Image (cartoon, helix red, strand yellow):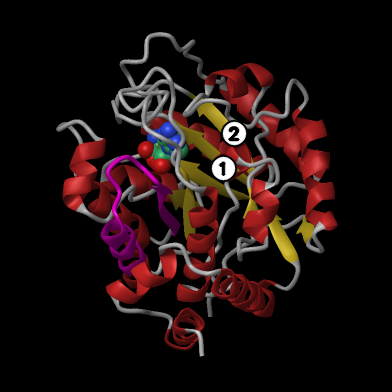
Amino acid sequence: MNRLVGLVDKLRRERILQPGEFIELLNNPDEQSRKYLFAQAVEVRRQIYGDEVYIRGLIEFTNYCRNNCYYCGIRRDNSSLQRYRLTPEEITTCCDQGYALGIRSFVLQGGEDAANNDAYMVEIIRAIKSRFPDCAVTLSIGERSRDSYQTLFAAGADRYLLRHETANEAHYVSLHPSTMSWAHRRRCIEQLKEIGYQVGCGFMVGSPGQTWQHLADDLLYIRNLEPHMVGIGPFIPQHDTPFAHYPAGSVELTLILLAVIRLLLPDVLLPATTALGTLCANGRERGLLAGANVVMPNISPAYARENYLLYDNKLNSGSEAVEGYYELLRSIEGIGYHAVSARGDCKRL
Ligand code: SAM
């Protein structure tokens, strides 16, 4: 039997591989093994989530950030960016529009903006939860104190996305200025889990300096953490960052990693990310066909979408988010899946 096909079987059966085995599987697998890996991931996903795709309405509500991550277009030192911050009314209007489209899960994402203090975030979370009690609210607003996470959870936030970025400390140091700490980020993720959030971690595929060993470390970290969600997407350079001249990550490797993560954690919520859709016209559909089960259409106002520029050529459906949304739904139906109007919680037993 083809050795890599055997490794896929082992991964499906045992939900873990040795680091060297992960690397063998990730590093340019032959056509037969790749197809087999995707087929296994899709089957496992289907057993748990059927043909359903969960929709998250993404609201990029501020692009102010106190951090200076070397890869990120909204880093503090990027002075070419027009900064914006949505008002609470603008945020609830996004939710109104999303709700009318059938969206029942909203993700509030932003830079680490000093204006996002606890009182302000509590006000926004309460406003959304009281208006839409049947919807889930996910936060993706970076590193905060345990008390703050606790306060926002008590206000009604259900989920929190905080990518770990890389499980290797030296690699983390090479991606971030010394004001940021690998250990602190991991501690934040642990605290979020302890508090009771549905937690998401994740990383960029092909970030500068990433090695096969780092990816194996990421997979082992994810397997041990058992998050409810994992967000991965290719690194894409942004022209006003220190990493402007590094090449983008590989679409193919991102798809392979999505499939491997599905087999590691069969019930995980796995988005086919915007970054994947940016590098490849049908990237999000290919992500779903590799084991992903979530898409996150952007429902922010046009002026926000134009300025939340984490990387170059970011996928943007133009002035009308609604048009892009219907197109996305059609493309999901086109590959045999079905977008559902639901909170879309993790089906973990
Ligand atoms: N500030 C919050 C945080 O730190 O989690 C949320 C916003 S942050 C911009 C969201 C994610 O965007 C990061 O975790 C990072 O993985 C991703 N990202 C940033 N720059 C990117 C780039 N150039 N290419 C691909 N993904 C990028």
In the rendered image, residue 98 lying in the magenta stretch gets the answer no
Q: Are marks 1 and 2 in contact (CB under 8 Å)?
A: yes
Amino acid beneath label 1 = Val
Say left or right for 296 vs 64.
Answer: right
Instruction: Tell me where residue 63 appears, x and y as whole percent.
Output: 46, 22
> What residue is pinned by disc 2?
59
Q: Is residue 261 above or below residue 133?
A: below
Q: Is residue 125 above or below residue 71?
A: below
Quick one: SS at disc 2? strand
Q: How far is mark 1 from mark 2, CA to CA? A: 6 Å
Say left or right for 128 vs 104.
Answer: left
Say left or right for 245 vs 155.
Answer: left
Badge 2 density bin: few <14, some 14–19, many ≥20, Cα 10 Å: many
Q: Residue at x 45, y 84 (%)?
A: 3
Query: Where on the picture, by quarter, is residue 68?
Result: top left
Q: Residue at x 70, y 50 (%)?
A: 104
Magenta-highlighted residues:
198-220
Q: Residue at x 68, y 30 (%)?
A: 94
> What residue is pinned by disc 1?
107
Q: On the rendering, which quadrant does ligand 1 occupy?
A: top left
Quick one: SS at disc 1? strand
In primary-sequence order, the first of circles 1 and 2 is 2
Query: Where on the picture, by quarter, is residue 26?
Result: bottom left
Tag on residue 275? none
- Inspect this view and state whether residue 135 appears: no
In the rendered image, residue 219 lying in the magenta stretch gets the answer yes
Q: Residue at x 26, y 53 (%)?
A: 186
- Inspect this view and state whether residue 304 appears: yes
